[in-house]
Image (cartoon, grey):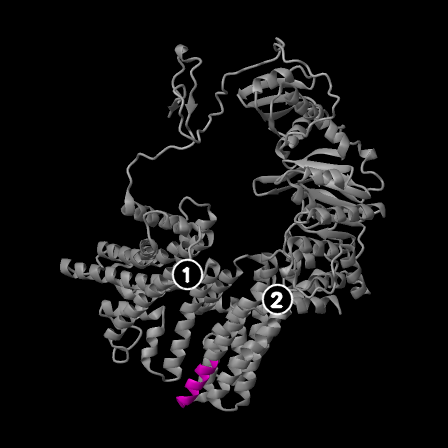
Amino acid sequence: MTEQPTPPGPPTRPAAPQPTTPQPAAPQPTVPRPAAPQPTTSPPTGPAAAVAAEPPAPSPGNEGAAQIYDQGYRSYDGPRTGLAGAMKTLVWFSIKTALGMGRSARYKIVPVLMIVAAFVPAIVFVGIAALLGDIGEDFLPTYPEYYGFIVAAIYLFAGFVAPELLSPDRRTGLLGVYLASPLNRAWYLIGKAIAVVAIILIVTLGPTLLLLIAYSLEDVGPDGFIDWLSTFGQIILSGVVLGLLYAAVALAVSASTDRSMIATATILAMFPASAIVTDILVNEADQTPHLRLLNIPNMPRDLVFRIHDERGLWPPFDNPSWTLWAAWLLWVGGSLAFVWLKYRRLLVRR
Amino acid sequence: MSLPPPPAPAAWPPPDATIVAYDVSRSFGSLVAVSSVSVAVQPGVSALLGPNGAGKSTLLRMLSGQIKPSSGSVWVAGGDPRTDAEARDRIGLVPQQDGVFEREKALDVVRLAAILSQLDNVEERARWALGLVELDPDLDRPVGAFSKGMRQRVKIAQALVHDPVVLMMDEPLNGLDPRQRKQMISLFHELGNRGKSVLVSSHVLEEVERLGSHVIVIAKGRLAAQGDFRAIRSLMDNQPLRFRVVCTNARRVAASLVERSAVIGCSVASDTEIEITTDDAKVFRRAIAAVCRNVGARLEEVAPLDEDLESVFRYLVGAGG
Amino acid sequence: MTPFFTLYRLFLRNQLTTGRLVLIGALSAIAIILGFATGASDPFDPVETATGVVWFFGIGLMVPIISLVLSSSAFGDLQADETLVYLWHRKTPRWQLAAAAWLAPATIAVPATALGLVICALLITGFSAKVFFGTLLAVVVAAIVYSAAFTLLGLLFRRALIIGLMYLFIWEQFMARAGGGAATLSINTYPSSVLAQITDVELFLADRSIAVGLIVPIVLSILALVATSRRLNRMDVA
């Protein structure tokens, strides 16, 4: 409600009181209110005006001299961390978001459940190994076999994490804020990809490493240091191979829609659908076994068997290892390229 | 200022009340949206007034049966609207949200309402209801392509189609232009005069001023005031109000102002700005222009420092709760 | 026009969006391609192969996914655009609202899945009465019971789509197949049993009699309908 100056009144004015000395009762403070700092809009020019960054300590001799406390804007004098700092923040913030750290309990449910689902079988097998010792060895799964128990948890995890990290940034305009920092689109995507892969590695790498350590302590692990080291290498490679593929595919789906629920649903449906359709085509319709390379959940799993020199899901004469490696490269490369294409063309609004 | 004491059980609710809520509360998790509110609404137009977030919508949703009170009871036109379908059918409801069936035409939306209320002459009733809100029933556009004001009128038409005894409308004047607003308000009055109980929520004081004399003021989830609008308003007017005056020659204006009886406090913030406290806003507003003229100052702005709604309700809540 | 039919028609109209039609078209096309490719491979026992394909792809994937996408949106869409209150607040009984929300997506899901899957099966066997009727009946039973369950899910949860997928792929495809009694608690078991019984082909864990295969889905659908009505009566509607 703002009142404009009123138009001139009627000619007969009421007798206006002459400005005289104020009544003694009337308050007439003239000192600027201390509670309301006056932001300056233009640099001070008069010699009496002074701009102080901080209110000076009240001194008796200060009375009468004007002070303007500039609290409207403070320049930043701290260190500027540049690209490295921005990347570190982006990756760490993304990981925290996806794991529900610093968020309310309902954002913690899915990550906690998935991580528990991935580790619980490992803990059970460690228990069996501890109880039965050598006899138990026949009951224990090999490292590649272990993924059979947790593959669903892994791709569910990918299905929740990747959309959560990509889609909302586009919908809410946060992407524009990121791009106003030293990050450009490529670095932004690299940061997000690092975060997604890092999180998925928790479930593709964590449980098998746990098994290795526990088996070793129970003396059912690899014999000798060389053997142990090579098993360790195989486990790391396996986890990375699985994690990278699932992460890349999930990122590609997430890049295609702003609605994370649709992205998650698509990922959750795509993994089993690709397995069912390719299984039928190869096993029932006698089509070329190379169609198995389109089986998103199982293709990298078979690769893991080969990394460990074990008999896998598919016969090597049908699916030579090099075709699996080539398909893996194509899946990962193709998915990441798709993400890049989507983002390169994306119109970012702020 | 003080509110009347809680009504004695014998006199409450009034015999002709059509909407009665007794001691209703509703919380969402740890947030208490409405707390121990008892209201009775009689035929005629009543306004539910309160700032955004005060709990108006929650209260209205409890009254219409949309949500269940955490405690307390609701009775509307013969029954509990949550469980009694016939009682519910005596309510015409205009919900707050914008969404109406986007892909349907206006006539189809109102027809749907008529069919679901199991009316006989669906087509006729639907056209009649659209006529009441002055919408062309033969508009060949889906509601999704309507302006906000037109959607609002479709929502009102579907609420009127079954000629309910009670009308509950959550911010129905939102998005209407001044002419439509005036039209709607006169429609509400007409309905009120015909014996319907029309309950309209709003956060706009001016709107409520024109809506009706009976208001229910809710603030911070509690009943802050209830009764005749003008009476409440004048109770509020006795509260001191602060204004910011921007003018040239502020000191002389200030000196002159303090002599006025309406002004009870005055402080000069700068050469061009004064803050005054008044116990009679109307007299002050009349006086300020004259004072400026007399001392030869140019008046640029008079703005209330705390007459925004939040503050108005603070007075009410301060006195009532 | 009766209130029920009006509601049914409204739900039906809301169901048809481009995305859903594309999904139906794509899955139907895959079904026909699978049928064509499998038929061309000259299988040793066409009836067994056809039954396996319909079971694995149709009852295991296509029918539940299409039913889920359609049915979970019946109330889901109304809640998302906040128009449920316009239907809910009228005096028309809530069970009619629940029934309309169940039947409308089922009306689309039944032909949308049966057509592709019956063609798929017949491309493998040529005309075979037991494959034709087995596929048809199993798909209809599956579409109806999944629609009822997922309509309820759509009323209960905003993220019904994801919860439904997790049920399908974690419970039905993963846990329930671990054996034991878990399969009893899987909707999939019953239409699969109908298919297995009529085509006389043994399917994994689909070992119930045809009566059980029919009655349990009917009972489940009615229970879901009752639960949906009750939920409508008790819920808060914005």
Q: Position of residue A220 (x, y in %)?
A: 23, 60
The one of B205 and C73 positioned closer to us in this rendering: B205
Residue C122 in sight here: yes
Q: Have a look at marks 2 and 1 and say if they share a chain.
A: no
In this rendered view, identify the residue nearer to me: A241 or B136: B136
Is residue C33 highlighted in magenta? yes
**Mark 2 to mark 1: distance in Å?**
26 Å
* Percent x, y of residue C191: 54, 75
Chain bearing mark 1: A
Residue C233 sits in quarter = bottom right
Q: Residues within 10 Å of mark 1 (few under 14, many from 20)?
A: many
- Host chain of mark 2: C
Q: Amino acid at mark 2?
A: Asn
Q: Position of residue C74 (x, y in %)?
A: 60, 64
Instruction: Confirm or deny contact between disc 2 and disc 1 (CB under 8 A).
Output: no
Residue at horizontal 60%, vertical 57%?
A: C81
The magenta segment is C31-42
Q: Quadrant of residue C174?
A: bottom left
Considering the numbered disc 1 on the image, is that residue within a helix, a strand or a loop? helix
Please name the residue that numbered disc 2 is placed on: C14
Circle 2: element type: helix
Q: Residue furthest top?
A: A24
In front of the other: B242 or C57: B242
Q: Amino acid at mark 1?
A: Ser
Q: Is residue B235 shown left or right of residue C58?
A: right
Which residue is the site of mark 1? A254
